[in-house]
Amino acid sequence: MSQKTCECQESKCQNSDIDCATVKQMVAAHEKKPASLIPVLQDVQQEYGYLPREALDIVARGLNLSVSNIYGVATFYKQFRLVPQGEHLIKVCHGTACHVAGAEGISVVLRSDLDVEDDETTDDMKFTLESVACLGCCSLAPVITVGEDTHGRLTPDKAKKVVSKYAK
Amino acid sequence: MSKTATDKFTVNINGEDHKVEPKTTILDLADDLGIKIPTLCHDPRLKPFGACRLCLVELEGARNPVPACATILGPKMVIKTDTERIHAIRKTIIGLLLSDHPSDCLTCDTCGDCRLQEYAYEYGVREADFKGGELHPVRPQESDPFIGRDMSKCILCGRCVRICDEVEAAFAIDWTYRGFETQVNTPYGESLLDTTCEFCGLCVSTCPVGALTEARSKGKHRVWEAKKTLTTCPYCGTGCELELHVKDNQITKVKSRPDSLNHGNLCVKGKFGYDFVNSPERLKKPLLKKGTDFVEIEWEEALGLMAKKFAKIKSENGPDAIAGLSSAKCSNEENYLFQKLMRSVIGTNNVDHCARLCHASTVAGLAISFGSGAMTNSIDDIEDAGAILVIGSNTTEAHPIIGLGVLKAAREKGAKLIVIDPRGIKLTKFADVWLPQKPGTDVAVLNGLMHVIMEEGLADKDFIKERTEDFEALEKLLPEYTPEKVEEISGVPADDLRLAARMYAEADAASVIYSMGITQHTTGVDNVKSIANLAMLTGNLGRRGTGVNPLRGQNNVQGACDMGALPNVYPGYQKVAEEASRDKLGKAWGCSLPDSTGLTVVEIMNAAADGSVKGLYIMGENPMLSDPDVGHVEEALENLDFFVVQDIFLTETAALADLVLPGQTFAEKDGTFTSTERRVQRIRKAIKPPGEARSDWQIITDVANAMGDDMAYNSPSEIMDEIASVTPSYGGMSFERIDKVGLQWPCPDKDHPGTPVLHVGKFKRGLGKFHPVNFKPPAEEPDAEYPMILTTGRLLNQFHTGTMTRKTEGMDEVGPIASAEISPKDAKKHNLKTGDKVKLVTRRGEIEANALVTDKSRPGIIFMPFHFHEAPANRLTNPALDPIAKIPEFKVCAVRIK
Ligand code: SF4
Ligand code: SF4
Ligand code: SF4
Ligand code: FES
Ligand code: FES
């Protein structure tokens, strides 16, 4: 990680991989008002793939909000991730069509196979598992996506096999 | 017709007409009338929220029922609080809540104190009636000190989130996720220790169910088994009311009632810092030093020995070879007896206490300006101020509940907040303007404010003319203190100074709050006089919301001063030097009293070091941590012929004594404390003392009698009656009268209602007197050898020398230990990170502390709390004294990082 350039040296960010100058710049790029929060969080997520705790500290100082408040907002919206994302993001569709076609079974198997809950990342940082709403290809139900790839007409077993291909 | 009478209007509630004031809610009225309306999301400390809908009532003309807690009454409204429809709605709400609530009442600690349980019973709702919906599976998290969280019991009323934000301004918890998943949580679900939580426990106090609880009370007793005793907090001078819960002689929980002066709010010390009372380390028997060890002895032997030793010193060296330190932690009755013992039995005025180290400058400075040395206004006045100037007071940490009042005034009531403090304390975050002065330059800053006020024509000419004298002298002094010059001296930007001056002077009512940041300087009295000048210049005295308000540190430091535990005054500040008072008290006490002024704390230590004081009696103080230059104090104490300490623990000081007497805590005795707002309040016995510990008033009586006197009191109440008879300002006090809320002095007679605001219409001394003061630099300034400034103070979660707070399990965890706060810039220069050991050196000595890098500290300034024996800041501080008040300069000395 880059040499720390920050002056604040708060104990929390001293021990992390977050470069606070980068985050400060993201904050500075927006107006200093609470309404800027969501765009700033989007930028942070873009950079790190998720919202690191230490980055939230810096955003909080910058926008004069509390971390708890920001966390509340971040959890309110599905788009924000609070843990580092694995190499492959698995989205299991739970839209109506997929739900009827057995999406829950797929989730159950993947959770146990990868030993994670929804929104968690495997210890080897390979996979992050999510449940999402309709992915827009209902004719293929039930559907999952792994990264950019879409896989349809799955059974729990097939889903497991699909995922295992990415494990290499 | 008076204004309020015209504003009132009539409403009808449950068929009866009532007159109400504007802005009354339906719930307010119902509460006044004793009509019960169930509520879950309402707390009078919070803004109306209207979320739970349990308080719905019928409003004639409205199609749907309205929430009583959030609906303001209007003229001619007709309300019914308990119709069949309402009853049914409430039943459904309670049922729905119960259906998603674990049936845990049998083991829940809140059982018996739970709103949901209470209403389920009242409305006859059985859980089974609604079962079948989805349940929240959140598991309890109990890893935090003090606060137990079991979110499966949460009914999402939001009171905890709102109180943490609206009242405490800590913002530690918030709503997270949404819909069915909604949950109250910390960021990332982390421990409260990693958040901004201040462990005030307000969230626990407001939670209507068992979701938030006092963690360490778990399993200790059922709610109804506890014996409850109302008393007063033993920590700071705010004087919050506590309700001690006791089972099997153990304090198991502390609460505060919503109808108390502090509205049920407490800080972490008052709420959770009670372990010291039941600590196994409490002293249980008198201890005598044999060689280097202590052995337990009987009371009779201890008292006999003490009498014999003091008699010997007195006969050989005269009474002034004996000195006593009384205690701001002990009750008024005890302080009164202590000084009476020293003066009438031993025969010396050598009696002082730690007020010397905190507010002697206040007593001296305000007495000559106004004629009375106490806080002029009341705590709840602050909310009526249009501007609040906080100088040298870290209010939210040192007087947390007064801090809440300041925050409320600034955040909700639109008061302008001006903070003058070298450190970026919490209040600066809410301030309209923050003036970070270089430590020790307060007089310059205050003169600068007055300069601007004069220049811009904002002075209150009528007030100056009618109520003050010697204004001309001040007028001559001010012109040279231009904002630019003040900036040069203090580092405060000239324009900010101007802004602050206008804010303070333009408000209808402006209050100054200050504390040790003002008093603990060699220029302490000068600082206080300057504040008095500022308030008089703008006419900000003698009305609600105004005043000069010194916040007193210890729970009873005000009382200890009032009781004359000072070398120059008797109870009620009657002067030793005046023959009339000497005669009056001599007559009351049946003796003739010495006429020479006694020695102060630091002078006593010096006299002990040079051998002129040979016997010392210390009650409940710990100068080995609290006094400046403790290296010197230790030598002095070692040099005494006979040294007695009376305390609840074997403190650093007691360890040096020849004889140690076991005293009692506030929870074991009756008596009174006087809070910083001059309010005399009760403490009440809640538990039995450990072993043979005796109450301090009892011990003093025993000592007096062992020395041949005949002091006989049956109870502290009798002592208070004697106090009232000799102390004009306490003339109307009695245990009976102060039973409920206490009384504020002056209260000269039995019919007097007490005095919330001093100097109304007329100063105590007649005219207020201006004292022009020129800026003088601190005794020690940074130089090449010691290039930085060290300043000392307190932390929220610790108190004084830690004798009480540090005995509480968990207390050390919730704040830094033995820390030295240092700015990021200086940290970089010295290559320090938080947690690193840092060696600090001054001309007095050196210590090692834990670096805490924070932008609260500004470059060039190091802050250290003085609570920790691991890093006793007072090995470093400068004992240089204010020439009048004899207060040491704790707040500034030169230091270097080694
Ligand atoms: S203890 Fe106080 S600061 Fe901490 S979460 Fe509760 S209300 Fe907030
Ligand atoms: S924890 Fe208690 S106070 Fe907080 S929302 Fe839940 S029930 Fe209400
Ligand atoms: S503010 Fe002071 S009196 Fe109130 S609870 Fe805290 S320490 Fe006790
Ligand atoms: S419901 Fe799964 S893709 Fe639409
Ligand atoms: S108490 Fe009124 S809506 Fe909750």
Image (cartoon, coloured by chain):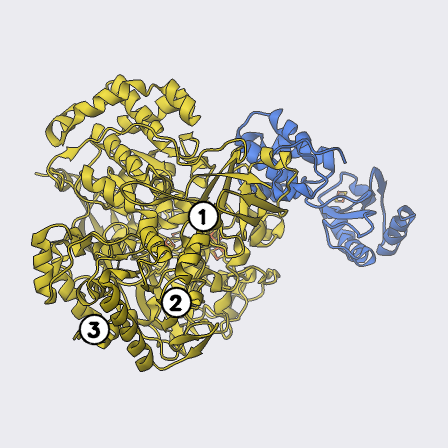
Chain colours: A blue, B yellow
The residue where tag 2 is placed is B123
On what subunit does the disc labeled 3 rest? Answer: B
- The quadrant where ligand 3 appears is bottom left
Residue B162 circle label: 1
Mark before the other along the chain sequence, 1 or 3: 1
Whether residue B89 is visible = no
Left or right: B564, with B643 as reference point: left
Q: Quadrant of residue B605?
A: bottom left
Who is closer to the viewer here, B348 or B207? B348
CA–CA distance in space, label 1 to label 2: 28 Å
Q: Position of residue B226 (x, y in %)?
A: 38, 74
Mark before the other along the chain sequence, 1 or 2: 2
Mark before the other along the chain sequence, 3 or 2: 2
Question: Comparing marks 1 and 3, which lies closer to the viewer?
Answer: 3
Q: Quadrant of residue B799?
A: bottom left
Quadrant where the image shows the C terminus of chain B: top right
Residue B715 circle label: 3
Left or right: B491, with A28 as reference point: left
Q: Position of residue B441 (x, y in %)?
A: 38, 31
